[in-house]
Amino acid sequence: MLEKLKAVEDRYNEMAERAAQPDFYADPQAAAKLLREQRQLEPLMNAYRSYCKTRQEALDLREMLDGQLEEEMRQLCQEEYTQAKKDLEALEEELKILLLPRDPNDDKDVIVEIRGGVGGEESALFAHSLFRMYSMYADRRGWKVSLLNYNETELGGVKEADFVISGDGAYSRLKFESGVHRVQRVPETESGGRVHTSTATVAVLPEMEAVDVDLRPEDIEMQVFRSSGAGGQHINKTSSAVRLIHKPTGIVVSCQEERSQVQNREKCMQMLASKLYEIEQTRINDQVTSERRSQVGTGMRNERIRTYNFPQGRVTDHRIGLTLYQIDSIMDGDLDPIIDALVTADQAEKLKHSQS
């Protein structure tokens, strides 16, 4: 591990030297790529340098303990040496995690799709609650939310909501949200006060460019229509909304939130590319043996991942057995306690596989 870390440090130092050259920004694209790589390596380098410093301190203390010391000084050195060994163990675990292969999509923006599931109008109202939750979480992190397609019900629920969340590390944080979300609460439409169970599905896709996926024009059928319903931001009399049908797979995507047909088509192409990428990744993952699959994973759309129980004020993530009695703050976008736990569980599982 230390040899690998030394090689990474050499690479990091090379990048720092290159960034200091007067002509560094002559090629802005190459400069941005190098700075992005350098920024990604910073946590690893900080941990490695702390490890080297702590290891040297431990060696110095061990040398002092092997020599002639007065009893009081020996006790002090022994305490510091014991603490240094604990710090080394913690730093070594941190380095192992930081050395795990990164998901190449972690820095990408995401396309989020929310659909009402089982439960009629209540499922649509819950889908709206989830849309609000993710929008507020994005706002907390300084991310931008851009609507692609939003189809409301008469009571303010959401039949479907497609939107892009843009921001640093959006996919790395939100990729665990894909799956079936279940709610247990008294619906606004329930006069008898009975608790109902409903569901909504969430899909989180890394936003891909059309050039990242093999998209052939002859495989795509384009339809145009007028923006309609309460969800269209720019309802007008022109056919600016776009629907694309990928004939080989039957995938259908639509966008009606942009002002022009050209803009809506561009967004549709990105959505289609992301969906086709997801299909290919699923195919590849299915070839991996069940023993090597991540315990947490990124969630499948038909897998129940979380329950929101309003009468008890609790949220339970079934993948890691986590229950938090903070439903109000979670629904207001405070998702970090859940996401942090999912990231930690995912890292622990990958670490176990890397050592097996």
Image: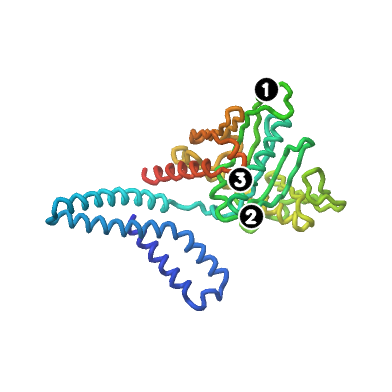
Judging depth in this view, the residue of 8 and 35 nearest the camera is 35
**Quarter of the N terminus within the rendering:** bottom left
Return the disc, 3 or 1, that comes first in the chain's sequence. 1
* Residue found at the far bottom of this picture: 22
Labelled disc at residue 158: none
Q: Which residue is mark 2?
A: 214
Label 2 – label 3 distance at C-alpha? 21 Å
Above-or-below relation of 339 to 32: above
Q: Position of residue 185 (x, y in %)?
A: 65, 28
Return the disc, 2 or 3, that comes first in the chain's sequence. 3
Q: Which residue is mark 1?
A: 194
Picture quadrant of residue 107: bottom right
Label 2 sits on what residue type?
Asp
Is residue 193 visible in the rendered image? The answer is yes
Judging depth in this view, the residue of 49 and 326 nearest the camera is 326
> Residue at left 25%, top 52%?
80
Label 2 – label 1 distance at C-alpha? 50 Å
Judging depth in this view, the residue of 210 and 262 nearest the camera is 262
Question: Regarding mark 3 in the picture, which secondary structure is present there?
Answer: strand
Return the disc, 2 or 1, that comes first in the chain's sequence. 1
